[in-house]
Amino acid sequence: MTSTETDSTSPSKPCLPIVENFSRRAAVKAGFATLGAGAFVAAISPLRQAAKNTSAAEFMQTHYTELSPEQKADVIARLEAETKEKYGADVTIGDDRPIPGTKFVYAINLSVCNGNGKCVEACHKENNHDRDTNQSYIRVIEMPKGTMDMEQGSTTYTGVVPKDDKFYLPVQCQQCDEPPCVDVCPVKATWKEEDGIVVVDYNWCIGCRYCEAACPYHARRFNWKKPEVPAAEVNPDQSYLSNRIRPVGVVEKCTYCLHRTRRGKLPACLEACPTGARVFGNILDKDSNIRWILENKRVYILKEELGTKPAFFYYFD
Amino acid sequence: MSSIPAKESHITSYPKFIGRSLWLATEGSFAFYAWMTMLTMLFLVGANAWANQVAGGMIGTNMTDQVSWGLYIANFTFMVGLAAGGVMMVIPAYLYHDRKMHDVVILGELLAIAAIVMCLLFVVADLGRPDRFWHMLPGIGKFNWPISMLTWDVIVLNGYLVLNLHICGYLLYMRFLGRKPNPTWYIPFVMLSIVWAISIHTVTAFLYCGLGGRPFWNTALLTPRFLASAFVSGPAFIIVAMVLIKRLTGIGGLDHPIATLTRIIRVTILINLLMVASELFTEFYTGGSHVSAAKYLFFGLHGKTALVPWTWTAIGLNITAALLFLWPGLLGFRWRPLLVAACCMAFVGAWIEKGMGLIVPGFIPSTLHEVVEYVPSQLEWKVTVGIWAFGLMVFTIAVKTALPTLKRPAEH
Ligand code: SF4
Ligand code: SF4
């Protein structure tokens, strides 16, 4: 390309002025540049603190689905050691995989739920949530009778429950079959497993919170700070994709307690519910309780118009 | 060392040109050094606040699970508009062959570069785990393309940056060599950049309007509204920059471009207002629960009114600016201060409207209809100011790089 363009060149016409005193100015500029660089390093020095909390192995770790069995074992051993070191608790972290032929669904009997909030509390403890912020994956909305408009409900109700003119609507992750949260994630840090549970790889999430904006059920939570759980209160039965203590700066969500349900137990919120409003099971099992309810009760789902196809149902007696 | 022998290869002479330009760009008067020192200091304050945010977690921001995006994403959205708005110089210059715009069109492209750099910084500031940014790199990370709109945004923004770096770099380099730019090396890219500018803002609008669970954003009008306000804020910024450049350097030939851009804003600002009005009409005339975010924005909801003053300020600024722009006298030289004032009003108006007035009400009320308010924390303001200071630094240096050649009208 040079040869064709040289014709129009006019090297005799300098277009940038010549600067005199080059060396002195250079020295002054170099001085300022050094000063600026030094100030910059000082300004970002808190990063060194943050870097200490991330090991090289953690930084380099690949996506959960790409880990070989040996790598997975190493990662889990590292996570267990870190929990011991940072929280002083001995925990075992499992790698619970979906059971073939299982599709988990949840249902809540709104005629029975009385808004006592035991499920909220159980979720908080089971999933090792930060004690300060009193986080939970479940929110119970107190609704006036005669409407389904959440606008009229309250999530911060107090006083004796149930109140006569109210009913109670617990909301948690609906494990959507068309989950908008999964679609928007730029790095595939969240996905839907074969048994219908939507999970997050806490070691892959970059914390953009796009999924939190996309979820229509306010089901996702962000770790705004490092979760604090006293050693004695740490639930030691953990799984990589569910209730292990989350790192700061990533998103988490309800996983239908997969560290329990994939081991044949029931979700913690269900066990804690004193009214028996909650039903959980495998929809593919023809003889299951949940199947009978979905076939025989007046069932509905939340925000059906959005096309998210929840695996979470509400019904009335 | 001012000119390069014709036989020297570009591989060695291009870095020389960049070094030389940077050297000259850091030459200047006392006022210039004072300005740069001030920006550096503000930038350092921002860098320090951000480092603290990374070390202590984002608890230092006032964002919550209900309002999970705030000042950073608001500024990001506005910056995309500013970058896209730079194209309003390119369209008259290259589509309508406006000769006089040719000489200064580079200012719009330099603005685009600075604005995109700021966009990228705002996104990084908003990440909970900036150390994992590499998860987004295609190839070594896992790129959720084409499903996630965010990956599209990453592609178009970086593409736009590269495109503008190429165009500016090439044009300035050719003038540095004292050669006539070869149209095949930049005209196709300029044409592409026009389409691309529209695409960056379209994709950014899709980020929000594709979310079915957020009725306030879930409107097809969002994209055209984004573009209309971008075509106000971008030219407004460039007008002010050109008025300043004329004042500070005495470079001629800027009056015609200023007049052209003023005429452009005259139209775009009205289109923007029209779209705001039609959106308000659909919201409030229809009513229903769909309207609660708009109600919160304009009048407050359940006694919570944090955004109301912002909104009405923006509306006041936009309408005043629109009226000023309609006045023919604004094109005259005598009314320069008024023109600058009108541009500033339009600029700030667009900033509020696209930022706090668009991102935050998308989250209020939340999807479970909780009204949790959001007011940016001091840390967020510091980081934001730091990024703005850095962007202005980039813009100042970039303009200074272009000045020697702007002084000499191009021989197109
Ligand atoms: S409820 Fe929300 S978080 Fe759960 S799967 Fe659906 S969209 Fe995702
Ligand atoms: S916050 Fe994490 S899981 Fe959610 S979209 Fe971003 S990267 Fe994906």
Image (spheres, coloured by chain):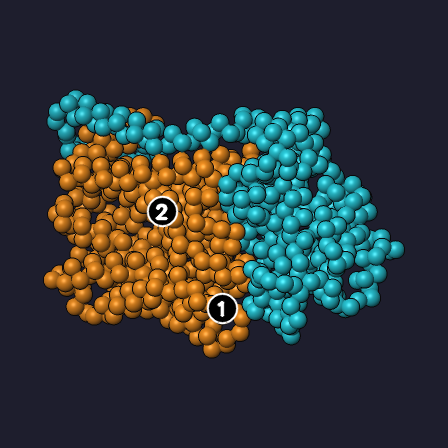
Of all residues, the one furthest to the right in this rendering is: A287
User: What is the tally of numbered marks visible in this picture?
Assistant: 2
Quadrant where the image shows the C terminus of chain A: bottom right
Q: Which residue has dot 2 on it?
A: B378
- What numbered label is drawn on residue B159? none
Q: Nearer the viewer, residue B19 or B47?
A: B47
- Establish if B407 lies above or below B323: above
- Residue at 27% over, 54% down: B237
Residue closer to the observer: A42 or A231: A231
Chain represented in orange: B
Say above or below: A103 vs B136: below
Chain ID at mark 2 = B
Residue under label 1: B292
Q: Nearer the viewer, mark 2 or mark 1?
A: 2
For marks 2 and 1, give the CA distance.
28 Å
User: Going 45% across and 37% down the picture, which residue do you hit?
Assistant: B56
